[in-house]
């Protein structure tokens, strides 16, 4: 066990898995010689060589497409998209090819790739270095989407993703890379995909969240407990598709009041699916409306610092929603 | 213009580009007068122009804040207009009922006093009269009328916490119907084994079996209790009398069901030789009747014995709270009082402060006021142990039901002269049975028997010179 930053947990996991299985390869823009623009892949090419750590051209569709082809031939590629904002050219490969191949070939082919990419804002990244567009992918059957924020979760889920026989989109919050740390096991502690984590138990209101909003939610919950004695249960989804039905419904029936928080936009976001699930399957236990706090409904996160701050949810906005819901 | 919770303040406008003040002329409207929007309110004279200030809103003049002849700067307050009610359909923050805005009331008890004011039309009415699915489900499960509950939620809404609290805090929790049919077989078997254990003790090497029916699994959180199963329709036959179920009866029924459903009941009995108490009472009766104006009964002796036993066995004066056990410091004895149409259990608070006579006075006072319907809410709450007296109706054994959330209840049965064996000779003694029902989640046969034994021992130690004061 060691205390690690998110970025180190991810990097160390790749080292562990590449040492354990020579079929695991990494490919993406600047991942080799440069070690990745965030340094996530630093050192990999020195140990594993250019055949297994591949610097690709600036061509996202090809990065994913080549990874898919390599996977068909028995490799286990980890394809990196340098910023989630750049993934759009690769969407056809991800959604139409990788996600559908097992179904389409009646199981003759499968695609065990991991697509890793930094997402999220609050780093003055502006329009094309801040996006949280997971909702486009979480609606795709055949694809798994995970977004751990705690380093131990990133370690455990990346291991599972690499071993998964089907495509996994692995989202890494860029603000969390050097901000979030916790105890990470050495080379074990694989975490199953599709399981959320109850970070703190409570009885009055549930907050369901993921990413950096977990930290904001915990801060808001602490303040509400101190100020009003509100007992808040906080759940980190960790996996965005498939959602952990048991955790979500279990908590909703327990407290009857649910607040969903995510950085991504509200309309059509992951929170909308969680809310619909609760309304459909836990209706009789609801004691208040299902509420969501999300990023502003504008085309992109602004560059201007006060506007970026206004765009993002934070503990004050979460706290205000918590108060309204608890008082309902 | 600014908006307070009820009125709009009209201020002196800037009547010309460089005008900084104006003199109030004649008021064209008075306090209490109704005005329409744009009606002229008051004449203002400035050095540039004379003008009238129009009403910015419709309403009634609440207050005039500028006198005729005053010269005031631009922006000064002229008057306040009450628009009468907030805008329909929206919940203005000021209209929020006080109970909902106080965190304490949400966390602690239902709001005391009057109902919170309506937030005015639209959504607030819906909130107050409708309920969330969770609240409706709980209401159906417990047969509760939501309209009877004080709501601490938005718009006076009854929240899940409110209704759960209401269900728990039901007053009038009478523990025993005066005459009962044969006790359920399970309880008899269990109690029988308990008595055997007390009398014979475990044989060497024998494992002492728990004298209770299998304790129920901890009740599931309310969220998982199944909805009330559909009841089969009961047919009415010719000549039947169909009566409505009154509020008291319903509350008794709710409490009994809940008590039996949550606490696995076991009843233990002990026989008490009351000759000492009988003698003491007889000796004190005449003076007592003269000084107090009523008769001294055996009940204060039993309560005193109970208080003593609770001090000796504090684990009985406790509450089962799922994850923890709360041992109460205060000894508050509930005393069941029979009414015409049911029972009520007023509480003697801090009964350990009182002497036998003090207890007698308290019981008398509470019983009289109970029958007159003049008990306060505080007097029927907060009991930590209950004593019941079905013996006055002639019973010799009973299986009382515990008053939630207490852990046990004691019933005193009739005092009957019986032939008993004392030092290998037969003699006649006034014997009284004590029936103790316990919640087997928190108490066991052995500890319960010890407690009951202490009560018995105290009563059997009463001498004529035992002080009553």
Image: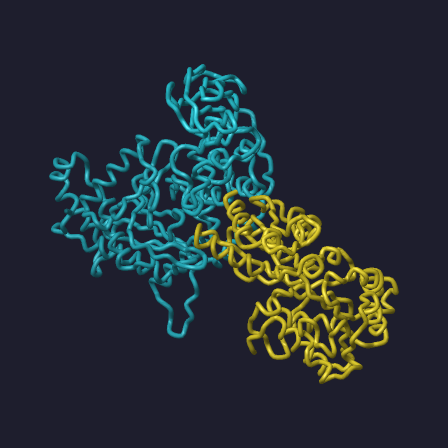
Chain colours: A yellow, B cyan
Whole-percent x, y for residue A106 in the image? 87, 64
Q: How many numbered discs sit on the rendered protein? A: 0
Q: Is residue A280 left or right of residue B284?
A: right
In the image, residue B446 sits, relative to residue B29, either above or below, namely below
Q: At 39% across and 48% down in the image, what residue appears?
A: B402
Res. A133 in view: yes
Whole-percent x, y for residue B273 in the image? 23, 52
Q: Nearer the viewer, residue B390 or B317?
A: B317
Whole-percent x, y for residue B418 in the image? 26, 49
Q: Nearer the viewer, residue B229 or A66?
A: A66
In the image, residue B248 sits, relative to residue A161, either above or below, namely above
Q: At 69% across and 61% down in the image, what residue appears?
A: A129
Q: Is residue B422 left or right of residue A75?
A: left
Picture quadrant of residue B238? top right
Q: Is residue B369 left or right of residue B15?
A: left
Q: At 84% across and 74% down in the image, what residue appears?
A: A70
Picture quadrant of residue A37? bottom right
Res. B256 in view: no
Whole-percent x, y for residue A58 in the image? 80, 68
In the image, residue A328 sits, relative to residue B44, either above or below, namely below
Q: Is residue B358 left or right of residue B226?
A: left
Q: At 54% across and 31% down in the image, what residue appears?
A: B125
């Amino acid at each position: 066990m060691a205390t690690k930053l998110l970025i180190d947990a991810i990097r160390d996991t790749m080292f562990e898995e590449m040492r354990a299985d020579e079929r695991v390869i990494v490919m993406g823009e600047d991942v080799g010689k440069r070690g990745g623009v965030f340094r996530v892949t630093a050192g990999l090419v020195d140990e594993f060589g250019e055949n297994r750590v591949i610097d690709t051209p600036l061509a996202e569709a090809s990065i994913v497409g080549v990874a898919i082809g390599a996977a068909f031939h028995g490799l286990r590629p980890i394809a990196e998209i340098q910023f989630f904002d750049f993934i759009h050219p690769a969407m056809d490969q991800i959604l139409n090819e990788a996600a559908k191949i097992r179904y389409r070939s009646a199981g003759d082919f499968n695609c065990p790739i991991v697509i890793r990419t930094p997402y999220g804002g609050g780093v003055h990244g502006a329009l094309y270095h801040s996006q949280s567009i997971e909702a486009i992918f979480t609606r795709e059957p055949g694809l798994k989407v995970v977004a751990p924020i705690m380093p131990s979760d990133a370690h455990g889920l990346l291991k599972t993703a690499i071993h998964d026989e089907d495509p996994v989109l692995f989202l890494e919050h860029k603000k969390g890379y050097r901000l979030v740390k916790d105890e990470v096991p050495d080379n074990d502690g694989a975490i199953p995909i599709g399981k959320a984590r109850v970070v703190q138990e409570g009885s009055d209101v549930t907050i369901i969240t993921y990413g950096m909003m977990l930290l904001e939610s915990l801060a808001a919950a602490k303040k509400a407990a101190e100020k009003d004695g509100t007992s808040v249960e906080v759940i980190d989804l960790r996996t965005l598709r498939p959602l952990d039905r048991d955790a979500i419904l279990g908590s909703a029936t327990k407290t009857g009041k649910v607040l969903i928080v995510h950085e991504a936009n509200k309309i059509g976001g992951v929170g909308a699916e969680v809310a619909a699930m609760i309304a459909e399957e836990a209706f009789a236990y609801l004691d208040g409306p299902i509420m969501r706090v999300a990023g502003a409904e504008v085309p992109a996160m602004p560059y201007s610092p006060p506007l970026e701050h206004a765009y993002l949810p934070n503990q004050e906005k979460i706290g205000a929603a918590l108060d309204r819901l608890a008082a309902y | 213009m600014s908006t307070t919770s009820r009125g709009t303040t009209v201020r002196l406008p800037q009547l010309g580009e460089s005008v900084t003040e104006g003199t109030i002329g004649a008021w064209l409207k008075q306090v209490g007068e109704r005005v329409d929007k744009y009606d002229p309110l008051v004449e203002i004279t400035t050095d540039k122009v004379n003008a009238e200030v129009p009403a910015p809103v419709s309403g009634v003049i609440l207050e005039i804040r500028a006198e005729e002849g005053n010269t005031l700067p631009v922006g000064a307050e002229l008057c306040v207009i009450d628009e009468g009610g907030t805008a329909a359909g929206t919940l203005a923050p000021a209209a929020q009922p006080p109970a909902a805005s106080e965190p304490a009331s949400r966390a602690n008890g239902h709001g005391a006093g009057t109902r919170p004011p309506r937030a005015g039309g639209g959504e607030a009415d819906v909130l107050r009269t409708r309920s969330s699915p969770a609240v409706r489900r709980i209401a159906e499960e417990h047969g509760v009328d939501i309209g009877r509950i004080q709501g601490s939620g938005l718009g006076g809404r009854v929240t899940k916490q409110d209704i759960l609290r209401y269900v728990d805090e039901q007053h009038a929790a009478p523990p025993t119907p005066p005459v009962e049919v044969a006790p359920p077989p399970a309880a008899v078997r269990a109690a029988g084994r308990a008595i055997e254990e007390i009398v014979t003790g475990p044989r060497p090497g024998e494992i002492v079996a728990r004298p209770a029916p299998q304790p129920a699994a901890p009740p599931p959180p309310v969220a998982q209790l199944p909805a009330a199963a559909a009841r089969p329709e009961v047919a009415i036959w010719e000549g039947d009398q169909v009566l409505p179920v009154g509020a008291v009866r319903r509350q008794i029924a709710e409490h009994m069901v809940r008590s039996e459903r949550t606490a696995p009941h076991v009843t233990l009995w002990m026989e008490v030789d009351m000759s000492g108490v009988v003698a003491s009472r007889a000796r004190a009766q005449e003076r007592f009747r003269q000084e107090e104006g009523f008769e001294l009964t055996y009940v204060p002796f039993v309560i005193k014995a109970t208080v003593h036993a609770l001090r000796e066995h504090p684990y009985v004066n406790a509450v089962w709270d799922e994850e923890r056990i709360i041992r109460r410091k205060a000894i508050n004895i509930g005393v069941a009082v029979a009414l015409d149409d049911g029972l009520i259990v007023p509480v003697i608070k801090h009964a350990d402060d009182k002497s036998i006579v003090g207890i007698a006075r308290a019981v008398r006072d509470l019983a009289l006021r109970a029958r007159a319907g003049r008990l306060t809410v505080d007097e029927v709450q907060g009991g930590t142990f209950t004593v019941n007296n079905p013996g006055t109706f002639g019973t010799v054994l009973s299986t009382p039901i515990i008053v939630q959330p207490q852990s046990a209840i004691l019933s005193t049965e009739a005092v009957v002269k019986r032939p008993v064996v004392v030092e290998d000779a037969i003699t006649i003694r006034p014997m009284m049975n004590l029936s103790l029902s316990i919640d087997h989640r928190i108490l066991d046969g052995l500890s319960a028997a010890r407690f009951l034994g202490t009560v018995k021992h105290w009563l059997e130690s009463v001498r004529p010179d035992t002080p009553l004061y």
